Image (spheres, rainbow, N blue to C red):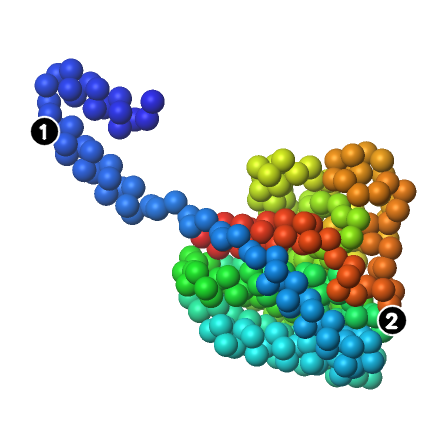
Amino acid sequence: MTRSSRIRRAALAAGACTAVAALLGGAAAAGAATPSPQAAPDIPVAAVKAHLDKLQSIADANGGNRAHGQPGYRASLDYLKGTLDAAGFTTSVQEFTSGGAKGYNLIADWPGGAEDATVLTGSHLDSVDAGPGINDNGSGSAGILEVALAVSREHLKPAKHLRFAWWGDEEDGMVGSRHYVDALGADSAKISAYLNFDMIGSPNPGYFVYDDDAKLEKVFKDWFAAKNIATEPETEGDGRSDHAPFKDAGVPVGGLFSGADYIKTAAQAKAWGGTAGKAFDACYHRSCDTSRNIDDTALHNHTDAIANAVWQLSS
């Protein structure tokens, strides 16, 4: 039984009804002062897939890819920027040079929240030259885009500042995210968490949670456990995605991953479904990484888990 109910029972036994009323009024006021965090909404997977279809069409119109230094990359960035501008975000484009070509990061800030405790959510936007990169990493890019749009639709008023980022030239060694972290300098201390999402819709999916920071890991593991979805620590992408520069700078990092070219085991197939003995994504870094190379259920589960983390960590 709660503390207030114990007090009420004792007071009623003593006949002190007036004291009970005062205590209950005080408890109600205290409850009103500390409301529970707003729950994250369900993220419609159809909306995420619509963004993936757009990225596919951009690749189709620009030589079959969205790679760094290619017109498909800038067209992808322009699509996201226009969508976020219309939703009320303040966006900026950060330029850098890599391999003799100009590269771009897209940064989107939601108004409000304490900027000395920023929750930053990111994904790399570029593909490899070989294909359109719809799972790697259109899936992460589209997923966090739709979470950002949900922030706008829900008129979220976070206690911590919310920032979303889409990195350029990850495929050549996390160039864009490393440039961003280097430019932050001492201001990296103002980022309370960096959440990274690189491949979240693999066609033979797994559910891997970054284990770099125990608090952030728990947020994701608890969400999946509540859905009766087993998870494993993420090891395939260690040091291979955009969380690495942030971790190197001392920023707490977390994230999700659905698997690339590692092979799914029999135990993993039993836990998650799919096919044992085959890669999580047989089209990883290949021309067949198209809009047909996506598992809708994995995409939906991962995107909802992202939304829950953004809502919870920014409250």
Does residue 258 appear in this view? yes
In this picture, is 69 found above or below 251? Answer: below
Which residue appears at 51% of the width and 70% of the height? 109
* Side of 52 where 267 appears, left or right: right
Residue 259: image location, x then y, percent: 78, 51
Which residue appears at 14% of the width and 32% of the height? 21
Q: Earlier in the sequence, mark 2 or mark 1?
A: 1
Which residue appears at 77% of the width and 76% of the height? 59
Residue 158: image location, x then y, percent: 43, 58
| Front residue of this view, candidates 310 and 180 | 310
In this picture, is 281 found above or below 73? Answer: above
Label 1 belongs to which residue? 18
**Extreme residue toward the right, this view:** 277
Q: Give, as a three-letter code, the residue at label 1.
A: Thr
Label 2 belongs to which residue? 130
Does residue 142 appear in this view? no
| Residue 47 figure quarter | bottom right
Residue 217: image location, x then y, percent: 63, 44
* Side of 276 where 44 appears, left or right: left
Labelled disc at residue 283:
none
